[in-house]
Amino acid sequence: MKAVLLGVGQAGGKLTTAIAEFDADAGYGAVLDALAVNTAAADLDPLPLETVLVGQSRVNGHGVGGDNELGAEVMDEDAVEVLDALAPKVTAEAEAVFVVAGLGGGTGSGGAPVLVRELNRVYDVPVYAIGILPGRDEGTMYQVNAGRSLKTLVREADATILLDNDAWRSSGESMEGGYEAINASMAKRIGLILAAGEAVEGVGESVVDTSEVINTLRAGGMAAVGFASAPAADDPQENVTTVTSAVRSAVMTGLSLPSATDADAALVAVAGDPDRISRKGAEKARKWLQEETGSMQVRGGDFPLDSDRIAALVLLAGVERSQRVEAFLERARQAVRDEREEKPDPAAAFENDEIDDLL
């Protein structure tokens, strides 16, 4: 799939960079170009991408301070500037545009839905979103922002692929190191989805192509991607269990949105040396995925790679019924309720007779 990436906000810009670099390092050529947009100049400076600073008349390059309503207003006002910068990148070769954003911060959560809406008005190709859900420890404001943003993003985008920060942060990691590891894991998953059908290393029996990715995501709503790999034997007959185990691991422990296994549609690509991939294993894995997701739309195919490992790449679409999504939405709803509770005025504590005036 030939794609153009648009990173919005700090987290969006970093993940966009990671995806573009993964694609370039692997030599797939699926990422045609990338652009990063932000209201904070300091967040754009270190990115090795073309950038657009928006909202200068409102926030003077200092960001929106987590205010996603302001983020949406600013992006709405400067959307033409962003679209002008993106226009030369979305050539006739482009098959999709991906808008990437963290859903907890102000610029990403507010600006991403606005840009998805505008892009859908301009382009005929699918416009997908990649949204990063904030962790539980990131504060009430981030949960509220993400709940509001996700509700809008799912409505505006052709599909929204989710990454759950809580599931991917390892205990003991620094905040910065944790996010770098998450970005690398997600970049591999998205990068391989984009590269499916683009690889030229060998000839598979039934190669996944762009139309199958698009048709899987046609279910709309929320989506998740999974990945897992294992060493492969030279004889494909010995790799029946390897293939099925890799697919199970990709779904059960390798999903970007864990436990999101109830899906409307699914795609499984078995990557590796075509001479090592077991056809029996691939068919068994596809049937297992059909039972696990409850979907009758399970597509499958090969991803030829020159490798001594077998990997499974899984894309699940229409996963909004999953427990993980419901748990997050309940967290967001509770954050909204907490936000609405009247907070006492700290100054009122000094209006009593027990504290003497100084003068």
Image (cartoon, rainbow, N blue to C red):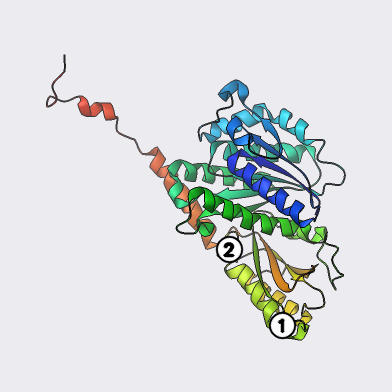
Identify residue for label 2. 260
Crowding around mark 2 (Cα neighbors within 10 Å: few <14, some 14 to 19, many 20+) is many
Examine the image and state in which quarter residue 255 appears. Answer: bottom right
Mark found first going from the N terminus, 2 or 1: 1
Residue kind at label 1, given as amino acid type: Val
Task: Tell me the residue that label 1 is attached to.
Answer: 240
Please say whether residue 240 is visible from this viewpoint: yes
How many residues crowd around disc 1 within 10 Å: few (fewer than 14), some, or many (20 or more)? many
Image position of 263 with respect to 96: above or below: below
Which mark's residue is nearer the viewer, 2 or 1? Answer: 1
- Which residue is most to the bottom? 237
Quadrant housing residue 291: bottom right
Residue 144: % across, % down? 48, 43
The one of 65 and 217 positioned closer to us in this rendering: 65
Image quarter hosting the C terminus: top left
Residue at 60% in and 59% down: 256
Horizontal side, residue 309 vs residue 67: left or right: right
Looking at the rendered structure, the number of numbered marks drawn on it comes to: 2
Q: Give the spatial CA distance, label 2 vs label 1.
A: 25 Å
Horizontal and vertical percent position of residue 352: 16, 25
Name the residue type under label 2. Answer: Ala
Dot 1: element: helix
Residue 41 x/y as whole percent = 61, 30
Residue at horizontal 79%, vertical 52%?
30
Residue 40 appears in the figure = no
